[in-house]
Amino acid sequence: MGAPDPSRLSLNTATVRKQWKLAQILDGCARHGIRGVAPWRDQVQEFGLDQTARLAKTHGLTVTGLCRGGFFTGKNWLEDNRRAIAEAHVLGAQCLVLVVGGLLFESKNLVRAREVVRESLQEILPEARQAGVPLAIEPLHPMQAAERACINTLEQALDLCDALDPGGSRGAPALGVAVDAYHVWWDPKLEAQIQRAGSRILAYHICDWLVPTRDLLNDRGMMGDGVIDLPRIRCWVEAAGYAGFHEVEIFSELDWWRKNPDDVLATCKQRHRECS
Ligand code: ZN
């Protein structure tokens, strides 16, 4: 396994969102020589869409994804996803990341929730295609099936891609996947499904799984501090043909959100090089 290409590092802005505003994060990426960035929509809204696009361009940053659209099982999903697609278009984002949503309100019907996700994707996909914004379904760890995403494996996500965007398997997909090592590392079918995904891999997210994990949402670890075999997963992803960015995405209430953000970025660079 060779070392990762340092120029492939991207920063998901959630990683230092507690310490810095978006403009400071973009400046920080430039200062640390990080070439990619994936902002969250609330931060973009606060700073301004055009301002964000302009500052990213000034710094020569690639927008590796916009976080996030989806939540198809909630209220107002259609308007919200239309706005998200338009924003991703203005930012020139390589994809719009979709966290698809969990159970419907006061429902235990997971089967129905998954149908709703499929129907909603089918409805929104032509608009995304028209805007030139690829949609990336992000399967989330099953611990988040109820509240955040009822698509929990790469296989489920790819079945949806093949059904709704059959031409996309031959390259330039309108519908693909975001492979987040944190969410899928445990999957016994991971290697086979990454291979299957091929050009549908629109984004690759990294961090680490801490033992023990103290919070289901906001206790992600820095690469190298947990138990995910990140170099192995990266090799699978690269073998599938993915040559894009490696996006560090760490939600860490107890640790990294409390540190000096310049130190966090320096550590991201070092651990990307040594542990990813
Ligand atoms: Zn992710």
Image: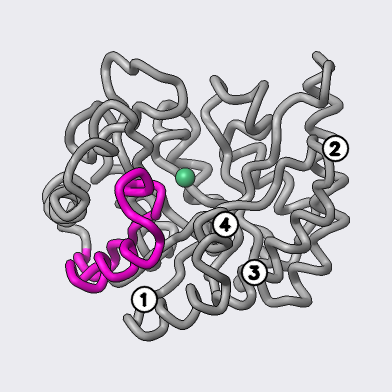
Main secondary structure type of the part rendered in magenta: helix
Q: How many marks?
A: 4
Q: Is residue 188 magenta?
A: no
Q: Is residue 268 left or right of residue 162?
A: left
The local secondary structure at tag 2 comes to helix
Q: 98 left or right of 126? A: left
Among the 4 quarters of the image, the one containing residue 240:
bottom left
**The disc labelled 4 sits on which kind of residue?**
Arg
Is residue 101 or residue 40 the one in the foreground? Answer: 40
| Left or right: 36 as drawn, with respect to 72 | left
Tell me whether the residue at label 2 lies in contact with that at label 4, contact meaning CB atoms closer than 8 angstroms. no
**Marks 3 and 2, how far apart in space?**
24 Å
Do the residues bearing badges 3 and 4 touch, measured as CB atoms within 8 Å? yes
Marks 2 and 1, how far apart at CA: 35 Å
Residue at mark 2:
116
Q: Which residue is mark 1?
A: 61
Q: Nearer the observer, disc 2 or disc 4?
A: 4
Residue at (41%, 79%) from the top-left corner?
Answer: 55
Label whose residue precedes the other's in the sequence (2 or 1) = 1
Residue in the image at 41% along x and 83% along y: 57
User: Element at badge 1?
Assistant: loop
Q: Nearer the viewer, mark 3 or mark 2?
A: 3
Label 2 with label 1: CB-CB less than 8 Å? no
Q: Which residues are magenta?
A: 5-34
First reached walking from the N terminus: tag 1 or tag 4: 4
Give residue 242's position: percent from left, percent from top: 42, 63
Disc 4 designates what residue?
Answer: 41
Q: Earlier in the sequence, mark 3 or mark 4?
A: 4
Q: Is residue 91 left or right of residue 115?
A: left
C-alpha separation, residue under disc 3 versus residue under disc 4: 8 Å
Q: Position of residue 187 (x, y in %)?
A: 47, 28
Q: Where, by quadrant of the figure, is residue 18 drawn?
A: top left
